[in-house]
C-alpha cells in the first residue's frame, strides 16, 4: 500500500496555527495567523514586500471599519464599506475597486479549501469565512480610463506660458539676491523634462544623473540621446517596469544638459545619485513636485484641471499633432496597448481640420 504525504501549502492553517496551545485571546490569535499565512502565500508567489504590506494595511482598515473578525464578515459589510468609501470619502471608482480587490483576495485565500482556514475556524468558533465580494456589490472594471474626465493636456500656448513663468522665477530670485535660485532653476528644468520625455511624476522624482545615455542614431544630443526610466508604473504585485525613452526635443536636451553640467554641481552633493537634489542633499519627492506645479499654475490663473500629469498628456497630444508615428509614441510613454495612448490624445481643432482635409482630398481630386 502506497501512502501519499501531502505537503502543506505556504500560508496554510496547518503551518500557521500552533497546535495544542491555549490562547488567552483565541480570536486575535486566529486573525494574526491568517494575516501571517496570507503574507506567506503571497511571498511564495514572488510578490514584492511593498505590495504585500499595502494589501495588509488595506485589509486592516477594512477590519477596523467592519469591527468583526473575518469569519464573521458578510456581503453586508462590503456593501456598507463601499458606500462609505464612495459617499463619505468620495474616492475615485478606480480606487474603490482596488480596495475591494484587496479584500477579495484575502477572503478568497481564507475560503480556499487547500489552506484549511475554514475548518480551523469551524472548530474554534463554530463558523467559517465566506465570500463577501460579488459582482453586485463591487465595482466592475468597464472602462480603459477612469480618471477625472476634466483632466486634459496643456494647449501649446498654456505650456509656453507655464514654462516661461518657471524660468522667470529663476530670474526674479537672481535679481532679488535671495535664496532659492538653485531650487527654482531645478524645478524649471524638471518640468521641461516631464514634458520633453513624457514622464510620470514618480518616474521623474526617481531619475538619477546616470540614467541619461547616448543614442547612436541621434549623435547631436551627445550623452542625452536616451533616458533610461527605471521606475515605470508597475503592474500589481510586480516590480517597476523599465523603458528607454529616446530624446526628441532639442530644446529640452539643452535645458537638462545645462542643469546637469552647470547648475546641479552648485547644490554641493557630488556623490548623490539623484538628478533632482534638494538644498539639504535629499532626493526631491513627488509631493514637492506637486506643490511647485500648483503654485505656478495658480499664479498664472490656469485651470485647476491642469496637473503635473497634464505635461505627460501634452507630450502625447503634441507629438500626435506633429505627425509622429503612434506606435513610436506608445513605446516612448510605456503603454502596452494603443488604446491607452489614444486616451491621452486630445488633438486640437486645427489638427482635426487638417486631418479631415487630408482624408477628403482623394475623393474630390477629380473635381
Image: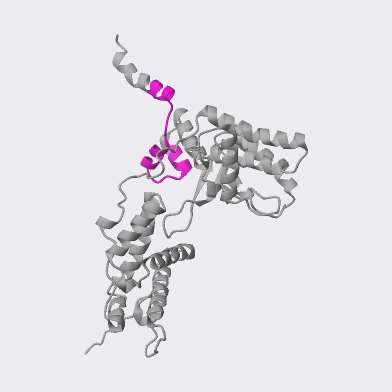
The structure residue drawn at horizontal position 75% and vertical position 36%, both measured from the top left corner, is 174
Residue 60 or residue 274, whichever sits in front = 60
Q: Which of these two is toward me, 91 or 312?
A: 91
> Which residue is at a point 39% across and 21% down the rendered structure image?
353
- Residue 11 falls in which quadrant of the image? bottom left
In this picture the colour scheme is one colour
Residue at the far left in the pictured view: 1
Q: Residue at x 39, y 42 (%)?
A: 340
Looking at the image, how many numbered discs can be counted on the residues?
0
Q: Position of residue 14 (x, y in %)?
A: 35, 82
Foreground residue, 158 or 208?
Answer: 158
Q: Is residue 351 magenta?
A: yes
Q: Which residues are magenta?
A: 328-355
| Residue 302 x %, y % | 53, 33
- Prevailing SS of the magenta stretch: helix
Instruction: Please name the residue shown 26% across and 60% down the image.
Output: 134
Depicted 217 relative to depicted 65: above or below: above
Amino acid at each position: 500500500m502506497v501512502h501519499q504525504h501531502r505537503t502543506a501549502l505556504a500560508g496554510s492553517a496547518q503551518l500557521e496555527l500552533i497546535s495544542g496551545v491555549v490562547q488567552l485571546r483565541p480570536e486575535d490569535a486566529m486573525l494574526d495567523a491568517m494575516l501571517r499565512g496570507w503574507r506567506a502565500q503571497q511571498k511564495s508567489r514572488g510578490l514584492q514586500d511593498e505590495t504585500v504590506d499595502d494589501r495588509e494595511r488595506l485589509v486592516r482598515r477594512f477590519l477596523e471599519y467592519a469591527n468583526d473578525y473575518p469569519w464573521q464578515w458578510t456581503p453586508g459589510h462590503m456593501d456598507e464599506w463601499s458606500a462609505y468609501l464612495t459617499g463619505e470619502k468620495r474616492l475615485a471608482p478606480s480606487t474603490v475597486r482596488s480596495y475591494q480587490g484587496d479584500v477579495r483576495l484575502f477572503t478568497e485565500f481564507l475560503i480556499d479549501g487547500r489552506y484549511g482556514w475554514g475548518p480551523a475556524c469551524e472548530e474554534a468558533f463554530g463558523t467559517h469565512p465566506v465570500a463577501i465580494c460579488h459582482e453586485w456589490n463591487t465595482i466592475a472594471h468597464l472602462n480603459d480610463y477612469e480618471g477625472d474626465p476634466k483632466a486634459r493636456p496643456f494647449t501649446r500656448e498654456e505650456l509656453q506660458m507655464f514654462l516661461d513663468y518657471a524660468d522667470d522665477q529663476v530670474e526674479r530670485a537672481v535679481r532679488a539676491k535671495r535664496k532659492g535660485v538653485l531650487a527654482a532653476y531645478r524645478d524649471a528644468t524638471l518640468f521641461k523634462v516631464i514634458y520633453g520625455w513624457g514622464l510620470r511624476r514618480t518616474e521623474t522624482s526617481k531619475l538619477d544623473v546616470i540614467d541619461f545615455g547616448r543614442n547612436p542614431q541621434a549623435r547631436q544630443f551627445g550623452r542625452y540621446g536616451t533616458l533610461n526610466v527605471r521606475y515605470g508604473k508597475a503592474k500589481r504585485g510586480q516590480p517597476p517596469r523599465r523603458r528607454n525613452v529616446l530624446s526628441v526635443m532639442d530644446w529640452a536636451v539643452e535645458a537638462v544638459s545645462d542643469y546637469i553640467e552647470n547648475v546641479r554641481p552648485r547644490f554641493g552633493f557630488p556623490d548623490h545619485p539623484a538628478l533632482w537634489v534638494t538644498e539639504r542633499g535629499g532626493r526631491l519627492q513627488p509631493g514637492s513636485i506637486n506643490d511647485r506645479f500648483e503654485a505656478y499654475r495658480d499664479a498664472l490663473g490656469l485651470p485647476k484641471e491642469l496637473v503635473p500629469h497634464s505635461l505627460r498628456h501634452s507630450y502625447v497630444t503634441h507629438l500626435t499633432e506633429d505627425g509622429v508615428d503612434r506606435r513610436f509614441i506608445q513605446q516612448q510613454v510605456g503603454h502596452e496597448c494603443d488604446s491607452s495612448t489614444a486616451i491621452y490624445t486630445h488633438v486640437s481643432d486645427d489638427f482635426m481640420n487638417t486631418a479631415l482635409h487630408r482624408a477628403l482630398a482623394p475623393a474630390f481630386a477629380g473635381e
